[in-house]
Amino acid sequence: MSRPPGVADAIESIAAARDAKPAAKPRRRAGSLVWWIVFLIGFLYFFVPLLGTFVFSMRSDPLFSAYAVVVDDPQFAGTLFFSFLIGIITIIASSILIVPTAFWVRLRLPRLRPYIEFITLLPFVIPPIILVFGLLRSYSGDPFPLAGTDFGSNVLLVAAYVVLSFPYMYRAVDTGLRAIDVRSLTEASQSLGASWFTLMVRVIFPNLRVSLLSGAFLTLAIVVGEYTIATFLARPAFGPYISLLGGNKAYEPAAVSLISFGLTWIAMGLLTLIGRQSKQKIQIAGAH
Amino acid sequence: MTFLTLTGIQKQFGQTYAVHDFNLSAEKGEFVSFLGPSGCGKTTTLRMIAGFEQPTAGTISIGGNDITNRPPNRRNIGMVFQSYALFPNMTVADNIGFGLRVRKRPKDQIRKRVDELLGLINLPDKGGRYPYQLSGGQQQRVALARALAVEPEVLLLDEPLSALDAKIRVALRKEIRAIQRQFGITTVYVTHDQEEALSLSDRVVVMSEGRIEQIGAPPEIYNFPATPFVASFVGTLNLLQATVVEGEAARLSIDGQEIRGARPGTGSGQRVTVALRPEAVELGETGGSNRLRGLVEDVSFLGSIVRTRVRIGDETLSFDQFNDPSMTTSAIGETITVSFSPEATLVLEGRASADAAIEQAIAES
């Protein structure tokens, strides 16, 4: 649950759908029955587990008591808050790292793009367990004994999550940069006297708002559900909390899963909403 | 007094020269165009003035200051791009005021200047709009105002009208010229459109393959092209293969029909190319002492003029007549006589060079 495969593709398709013109109404043909069947299978594949989880969570007596227990548990709010906070810090750190990098690669080093893209995809190839062991090995002792303190561990957690966010953030930002005329905008602002810093803050970041949001929400969804790294760094995060709950209680983990699922969906909904609002602006940016 | 000076500018990309030994001095307030086909180095030269490219050799100075090694944001240059390059996240007013905000001018001063420029570009009530809410022509006017807001020493325009419709193109280029005159700002204008260059500029720099072919005022470029390339690239030009009959008397022969050239040459029997503007040729015998007879191959109606193509042996010749409801046009297949004065002919040495120039011009237009 922490890292659905193909999410990076999803970002691109979200971005593509945002840019695409509304498709023509599909005509009713004999073949459309096949598509309905495909759709139905997909729908069932997706919703039956959710429904099952919900039904299971309802077995608690009285109805919804599992949800009440969860909401009353101070650990629930505490871990969720911690994870959201770490998620937001991760997003900020990742944006500051990724946006100038993607910008520079697009402007000056287009030949490096495939390599950068490969590097950003490494989190899909390297399991989080390897990543966290590497971090613990490197930062447990001198000269950077970070793992020994709470603050240090939080730093390591954010660092690890920034790495996990690479594929989503880089792809989203790169897609966003494709939609604006980076070179002309850069040169225009330079000829008007702007420094690189002014250019990034006043022009590049504001024009990547929607792309950054799409990357950011995916990052948030991943960070909130992440288990392995948070556990090994002994952080009071939401992922380990669900797992702990799962070991001790019957119905509550199902309730927690559904709640976190709902929160993620709300985040996605927000993304679509914001994306739709600034659709025209984004499109015009690429106009020649 | 020269204001903008480019001395011995060279730009090398690997082994190839994008710009080769470019020298230019522009007066303060002068409007100079760089004209040439794509890939001739005109945009590269402009970008070197702006500071987006670094010349491999040579120096650029503005108002006596060497700016060759100064970064683009410290050159005080206004630039207008083909793609408008307005900041999509800012309103029209914020776009125009961007340069002033970067310079940390007081807010009320910025607002005053923005309003003034919005009036100048005839968009006084569009300050609150976003670029995507404007037409292409309006966007480019905003881009011009944005470039002028910071009172740059030099204004650079990189094919600013290429993305616009024909009608707006003509209207906007007049506006650009009027504003440029009003501000008295030294301007470099890059274009591949000879009509634009000729109608706008004080001087035109015709470029080909990274070299300057000719620098001159528009009438000079059009009437006295220095090279076959200029002759073929600027304006429509008839190029006819001729044989020298008697060089000293300027007697030439095209398909066995004898004509006279403008200036005496030497020798006899060698092949030369005669260049002739379509507007210098007339139907009938009233156009001058040179006569040619040929078969009408095509008549095309171009609005204000009618262009007729005549076959003379292996050569073809086009000539223009002003459209007039009472005029008689030739019929295809008819045999006609055309005439032109000896002064209208321009004899270019050799055959290959002119052909190559034409081929290049056609390939790139």
Image: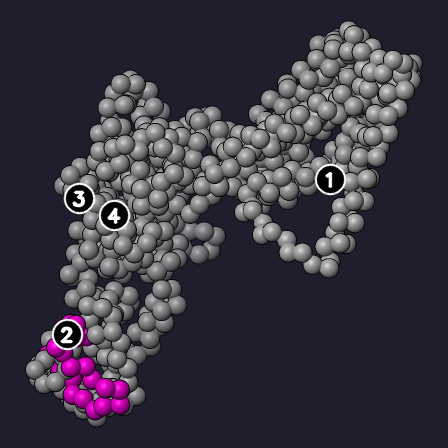
Does any portion of residue B72 appear in the rendered image? no
**Mark 2 lies on residue:** B325
* Mark 2 crowdedness (10 Å alpha carbons): few <14, some 14-19, many ≥20: few
Which residue corresponds to the image point at 26% horizontal and 87% vertical from the top-left?
B332
| Front label number (2 vs 1) | 2
Element type at marker 4?
helix
Which residue was labeled with disc 3? B178
Residue at (44, 56) in percent of width and height: B16
For discs 2 and 4, the disc positioned in front in the rendered view: 2
Task: Give the magenta-colored segment's residue range.
Answer: B320-341
Relative image position of residue B208 (x, y in whole percent): 33, 61
Q: Residue at x 24, y 28 (%)?
A: B115
Label 2 to label 4, Cα distance in Å? 31 Å
Can you identify the residue that label 4 sits on? B172
> Does dot 1 land on a helix, a strand or a loop?
loop
Identity of the amino acid at label 2? Pro
Q: Is residue B254 left or right of residue A171?
A: left
User: What residue does disc 1 label?
Assistant: A6
Q: Position of residue A158 (x, y in %)?
A: 69, 20
CA–CA distance between discs 3 and 4?
10 Å
Q: Is residue A185 above or below residue B223?
A: above
